[in-house]
Amino acid sequence: MTHSQLQIIIFISSTLLILALQSLIYELFYRYRQRVAQRLNDDLGLSEARATDQVQLFRNVSSVKETVSLRERWQHGLGRLLEQSGTQITMSQLVYGSLGLACLMGVILFGVSRILHGPVVGFVVAGWIAGGLAIPVFVWMRYQSRRGKIYRQLPYTLELINRSVRSGQTMPAAFQMVANEVEAPLGEEFAYCIDQQHMGLSIEVAARSLASRTEIVELQIFAVALTIHARTGGSLADLLDNLSDTVRRRLKLQMKVQALTAEGRLQATTLVLLPIVSLIGLAILNRPYVSTLFETPSLLALAAGAQCLGGVWIYYTTRISY
């Protein structure tokens, strides 16, 4: 590794570290007021009530998307992902935290490459990639876990609302009962709907907000049913019965599919991890055998790319939609 390459790596790592420290200082001392203002807007429904009250029940989604830029859609999607992950991580914390962790992993693997006499550039780039993807992958896993838990809580929640409606209680009272009796995360979501209603939003708008936040089809159907029931009437209890039964059947199918495909998923995990474990074992037990791979950055990058491509291919091959 030449002296100029080392200077470039040190410069990039130092820049990433400075950006991460700047974001941390900003979050600790200057972000609080913006969080309070944003929370007040959300509670009062100022950013959502104006839009939802003026939009028809069934609207042309494609025409709405055309008016929103790609950057705004990306920011909105990332913000929704962070909100629904339950990690309390802001967007700036995600970005600068990923940069800081990428810098840290680059420095660590730089030291490892010097100890193992491996390709410095390859190790540092691998550290940047691993560190930069660690926090986003963690947030995505938390999002999927939280969303799955919400879906598993849906049958009981819908039955609770159904019993409350059949007993003669109002829909806001049913929402309050769910917020009190159902555990997090779905209980927290209904409690947030109650807070929105206390701030002046109607129960239909709060339900549409809930469906928009969670992006669960059954909750979207529930929100539409509430809106139709408020405008035209109808048997809401029967719809809740059918909806809870549908969710329960889908959960049973999901557990059955997971049981039937457990062996295949284990084989897929083994195929993904086996090359990595074999490479580490050979590097420790028989270093000359794999020295050519470590001494040639292009071969190492090609092997890493092929491994990632194979992992993605196996994931989509074993994935079942239902």
Image: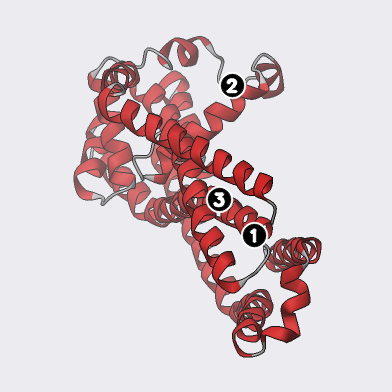
Mark 2 lies on residue? 72
Secondary element under disc 3, as helix, strand or loop, is: helix
Quadrant position of residue 110: bottom right
Kind of residue at badge 1: Val
Could you give the CA–CA distance between mark 3 and mark 1, rounded to whole angstroms? 20 Å
Number of marks present in the image shown: 3
Q: Position of residue 148 (x, y in %)?
A: 46, 55
Mark 1 lies on residue? 120
Q: Position of residue 80 (x, y in %)?
A: 48, 34
Q: Quadrant of the N terminus?
A: bottom right
Q: Is residue 107 left or right of residue 121?
A: left
Secondary element under disc 2, as helix, strand or loop, is: helix
Kind of residue at badge 3: Leu
- Residue at image point 60% right, 26% down: 73
Choose the circle earlier in sequence order: 2 or 1. 2
Mark 3 lies on residue? 133
Crowd rating for badge 1 (residues with CA inside 10 Å; few <14, some 14–19, many 20+): many
Q: Nearer the viewer, residue 180 or 40?
A: 40
Above or below residue 93? Residue 32 is: above
Kind of residue at badge 2: Glu
Crowd rating for badge 2 (residues with CA inside 10 Å; few <14, some 14–19, many 20+): few
Q: Nearer the viewer, residue 152 or 304?
A: 304
Secondary element under disc 1, as helix, strand or loop, is: helix
- Looking at the rendered image, the disc whose residue lies closer to the viewer, 3 or 2, is 3
